[in-house]
Image: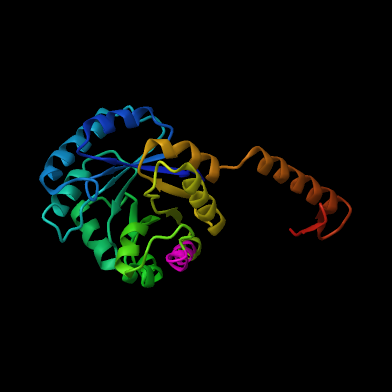
Amino acid sequence: MSIRPRRSVLYMPGANQRALEKARTLAADALILDLEDAVAPEAKELAREQVSAAVRAGGYGRKQLIVRANDLDTPWGAADLTAISELAIDAVLLPKVESAAQVEAAREVLGRDELPIWIMVETPRGVLDLDRTVAAANSIEALVMGTSDLVKELRARHTASRHEVVAALSHCVLVARAHGLTALDGVHLDFRNEATFTAACSQARDLGFDGKTLIHPSQIDIANAQFGPSDEDLAYARRVIEAATEAQRLGKGVAVLDGKLIEN
């Protein structure tokens, strides 16, 4: 099985040609070429054309390419999905998903059963019905938290601790693990504040997320470091293996390392 790292997943506005070009040189694990939130209504068609041209031109290396479409209920959704269906991308991201019916309607327009689908989890109904949605829909590969919209829908306030959305974040991870999916944390709006961004990444990693969605290239290195194994992590993992191997050699069911029990 091929495992793709998704530590850093950067949104790139489809209407910004310069951003689409710069994205080819960035160290993000994946790029979300955005036709939705990052694009003004008057620029939707331009964004669709530029994203299609950028994907066809290639040059993005090993980075995964995902295109976020507008919802089918908008004037642009159907045209987005039709255009996306012709592109050599890794997945399509659907916004504000609250039911399997939305996913299947989008798949019908796409007409490509083999194309993985990522879904945004950004409304109370989307969070509450997430397990049911994932169980009923086909080919969902990743769950992407939309914490900015979720905080607004909850009528909550953004806090440094993010306690206003921790329950939703943990629920997303639970569903992802139950169904073998990737779980990606939402964006950090104060993108120039490295300290608070690092803390948010650390919190998300502790909760079990595989990576974080980003809004600025300056966040990539921190996300990659926070969601990837450190030298200390790797060294400890090797010691665990050595301790477990030695315990097995001695016929013991468990091992002890640094005073802590290591089970099989």
Q: Nearer the viewer, residue 116 or 97?
A: 97
**Residue at figure coordinates x 49%, y 60% from the top left:** 161
Foreground pick, 159 / 50:
159
For image coordinates 16% across by 53% down, the residue present is: 77
Q: Which residues are magenta?
A: 163-173
At 25% across and 29% down in the image, what residue appears? Answer: 18
Compared across the picture, whether 222 is left or right of 125 comes to: right
Image quadrant holding the C terminus, namely bottom right
Q: Position of residue 24 (x, y in %)?
A: 34, 29
Q: Is residue 200 left or right of residue 40?
A: right
Main SS of the magenta part reads helix
Residue reaching furthest to the right: 250
Residue 62 counted in the magenta span: no
Give coordinates of residue 158: x percent, y percent.
39, 60
Give the left or right position of residue 111, taking residue 189 as reference: left
Q: Nearer the viewer, residue 28 or 102?
A: 28
Please determine whether, in this image, residue 69 is positioned above or below residue 47: below
Q: Residue 153's image quarter?
A: bottom left
The residue depicted at 28 percent of the width and 33 percent of the height is 19
In this view of the protein, which residue sits in the foreground, 164 or 73?
164
The x, y position of residue 33, in whole percent, is 28, 41
